[in-house]
Amino acid sequence: MGDQSADYKVFFLERHGEAFSNVHHHKALESEMRDPQLALEGFLQAQHVQSVWESELVAGIGLPQLSYCSPFTRTLATNTITFGNLLGASSLKTTIVENCREQVIPDKIEHRRPAEYIKEILPSVKDKKMLPSPCIVFEANFAEYDPYWVHKPGSDDDSNDEPANTNPESDDSFRKRIQGVLGEIFEQHKDKIFIHITTHAGWIKMFCRILGRHPYGTINGGMTL
């Protein structure tokens, strides 16, 4: 028997499916590709995870009790596909969490879209013409514009925004962000055991380091438990 006073959590950490930046990484850097979408292979990878989860439901795995997602196009699409047919009729909501994003770099690949844009691209569970989708909500105080980029006052969009820092985010800052997510989960969701987070490869590696585990290199569309 484990410690009765301890809180136990099981984390399913899903890396987003293959995005255009993964397919053409060097071209993406040269062309300043903004928050790239999933490539065809990425959609197929997410659909595979969905089918595996559906088959495991028969074996009793159940649905996660808490679902978090990075605010990028590729992670949101992955989360929607993974749980589209599973959460549509459930009460579970996926929460978009800023600190579930990848280690910040001063490149447009990691420049997230405005909250208004995210609202527009996400399918609505109220629209009967669309496939069932998880209900996705923003965390409290989610910023309209990327907080790691300087938004130009008076501008109607963020296409001319500049990185707030010309250097990549430090490992220490990155670690603290992830520890903050962990702290929130353990403090505010004590009754939740099974947690799913749709995120990025670097985030999963740092998560593992924080727990003293080997930093697994999760493939596109893969999952670490």
Image (cartoon, grey):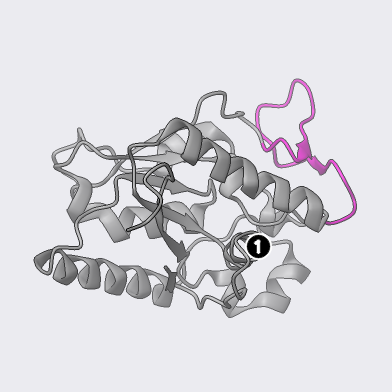
For residue 221, what is the image quadrant? bottom left
Element at label 1: helix
Say left or right for 182 vs 93. Answer: right
Say left or right for 220 vs 66. Answer: right
Residue bounds of the magenta highlight: 146-169
Residue 27, compared with residue 158, is above or below; it is below
Q: Position of residue 225 (x, y in %)?
A: 42, 68
Magenta stretch: includes residue 164 = yes
Q: Position of residue 98 (x, y in %)?
A: 59, 41
Q: Nearer the viewer, residue 138 or 99?
A: 99
Point out the residue furthest to the right here: 166
Q: Position of residue 153 (x, y in %)?
A: 78, 22
Is residue 112 visible from the viewing direction of this image? no
Say left or right for 156 vs 58. Answer: right
Quadrant that contains the N terminus: bottom left
Please name the residue that numbered disc 1 is placed on: 206
Report the predominant secondary structure element of the magenta stretch. loop
